[in-house]
Image (cartoon, grey):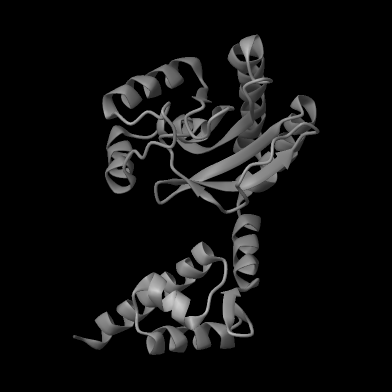
Amino acid sequence: MSEGNTHVRSIDRTLRIVQALQELSRGTVTEISNHVGLPKSTVYNHLQTLYENEYVSRSGEEYHLGLRFLEHGGYIRNQMDIFHVAKPEVEELAAETGELVNMLVEEHGRGVYLYRERGEQAVNLDSYIGKRQYLHSTAFGKAMLAYMAPERVDEILDKHGMISRTEHTISDREELSQELETIRDQGYAIDDEESLEGLRCVAAPILTQDDDVLGAVSISGPISRISGDRFTKEIPELLRSTTNVIEINITYS
């Protein structure tokens, strides 16, 4: 095996260990070794390198991810115009609706939370800035898929599949294709308990003047509050108004 291939394999192992630390929250060398299926000596060497470079921290015999990763994520987000333009609009929408408002972008076929703002009644969800979500089972994901080229949609679905999160999740490509057509016609997408039982979400895409998708803004809340005209008319109109302001500001900023 050439030196170049060995180097790539080493990076792959490091990234697997980093992912394991996120999945486990924290762990000993033995626990991480069992999780990734690598020898303990290999895991130890990678962890020591990460520790020396401040990417992991250690408490006794347990390792966990360090805040150095937050530095990189914060820097990347701060370089994105869409974050600065959308942030005040997301905050205003959360204050007006009282619900949880999210702004996401797509990367490598997944939706990534770039900013979130909680209204006074916002639900607590297991999500956070930087978390990645499947696109086919979420309102914000479908809002972005609807404006991608069919070839790109197929590429994403081929890579990530169509995992069913609940019994309401769309897991058939033809059905999803029909839904994406509806989203383009009406300008917004809905998630009716497709990603989480009891939760509804409405989302609208952020588009360029050429209808290229930049991201999406969504509002999430319990069925008890996101229902009737609020679900089908009021919230969609608020979202389209918000994304329209974001689109104009991005275009002319």
**Location of residue 249 by image quarter:** top right
Residue 217, percent from left and from top = 60, 34
Query: x%, y% of residue 143?
Result: 48, 30
Say whether residue 55 is visible. no
Q: How many marks?
A: 0
Nearer the observer, 54 or 125: 125
Residue 4 in the image: above or below residue 203? below
User: Image height check: is 131 above or below 253?
Assistant: below
In the rendered image, which quarter contains the C terminus? top right
Residue found at the far top of this picture: 229
1 lies above or below 31:
below
The percent coordinates of residue 30 (x first, y second) are 45, 81
Q: Is residue 22 above or below residue 239?
A: below
Residue at image coords 50%, 50%: 132
Viewer-closest of 248 and 62: 62
Which of the 4 quarters of the picture holds residue 67?
bottom right
Location of the N terminus (image quadrant): bottom left
* Left or right of 122 in this view: 198: left
Q: Is residue 176 left or right of residue 79?
A: left
Q: In the picture, residue 219 is in which quadrant?
A: top right
- Give the x, y percent position of residue 25: 57, 66
Lateral position of residue 35 relative to residue 245, left or right: left
Residue 232 shows in the view? yes
- Residue drawn at (38%, 21%) of the image: 179
Camera-side residue of 195 and 134: 195
Q: Tell which of 39 and 119 is nearer to you.
A: 39
Considering every residue shown, the one lying at the far left of the view is 1
